[in-house]
Amino acid sequence: MFDSTIPFGEPELMRASSFRHYLPHPDDGSGAAILSPQLAALSPSLMADLGHGGTHEQRTEPLDVLAACVRHAQPVTVHLQCGERAVPLTLFPHERLLHCPMPMDALLAPQDPELQVIHIEPALLAAPSDAVSHRGRPGPYAVADLCFHPLGAILWDLALHGGRRELLPEITGPAVYRVSYGLDLGDVTMSGTLLSAVYRLRRESCRLRDIATWSGFDRERAVRLLNGLYLQSGLIVSRSHPDALRDSWFGALGPR
């Protein structure tokens, strides 16, 4: 277990301004370091992914960061600015759990400004020893501790209502999308047009622009649905489908 780069103490949730004061600042003047150097020892690939290949640009959109941590299956603590407070979210991708000391309805309520990532480091907590990783279901430890939540439900809520309004990098570009028949949405609540769209995507492969024309959808809602399905490990992305190849070919021609 790595030592935290952030001091503990009262209050339980620090003010974001005080939290930033303790962050290391690189000599190049690029601002506070969002990525803890300890991440490099934990997972060089995650460090490179979050750091955009070593550029000075730093990811601050929560959905981007959480998606990368889940994709690399690394337990990490992501500190978010929520209002005036710094809130630590600890992700356990293998167990499909998330620990948060703040009630989730308060964390996910509309924010102005929106939630922002201010620091990422190796997990400050150990994974629950009796959590069960089975089809996204939390184990008895998670049920007993109200600070633990199903990871899938949080990712779904952030995808549908968070700050990201474009496709995640992993699924963008010329492609058609379909929902896997094995998709388990047991931790996710949906109804109406979203549920109808999921059933339709189980039957047919569609492009983003096609989904955006469905009843109850526009481009942003279609993007959010696809991001949410991808983070539930239920989205099939095909770039070799004829429609995707056709879009890619016409895209290479440039504006007409």
Image (tube, helix red, strand yellow):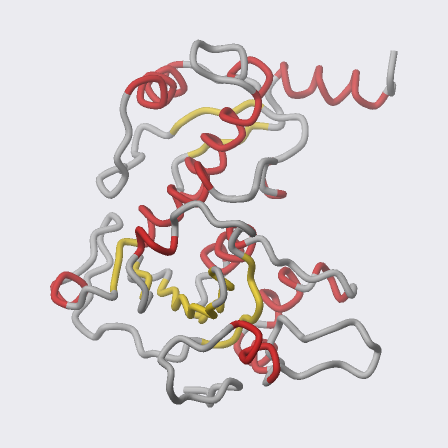
Relative placement, left or right, of 69 versus 21 is left
Relative placement, left or right, of 248 versus 65 is right
Q: Give the x, y percent position of residue 108.
A: 39, 50
Q: Quadrant of residue 200?
A: top left
Q: Quadrant of residue 212?
A: top right
Q: At 50% from the left edge and 85% from the top edge, which residue is drawn?
A: 6
Q: At 64% from the left edge and 58% from the top edge, which residue is drawn?
A: 59
Q: Quadrant of the C terminus?
A: top right
Q: Give the x, y percent position of residue 36.
A: 59, 78
> Please, is residue 129 above or below residue 215 in the view?
below
> Please, is residue 5 above or below residue 15 in the view?
below
Q: Give the x, y percent position of residue 155.
A: 40, 47
Q: Give the x, y percent position of residue 238.
A: 56, 28
Q: At 44% from the left edge and 62% from the top edge, which residue is drawn?
A: 73
Q: Quadrant of the N terminus?
A: bottom left
Relative placement, left or right, of 24 versus 161 is right
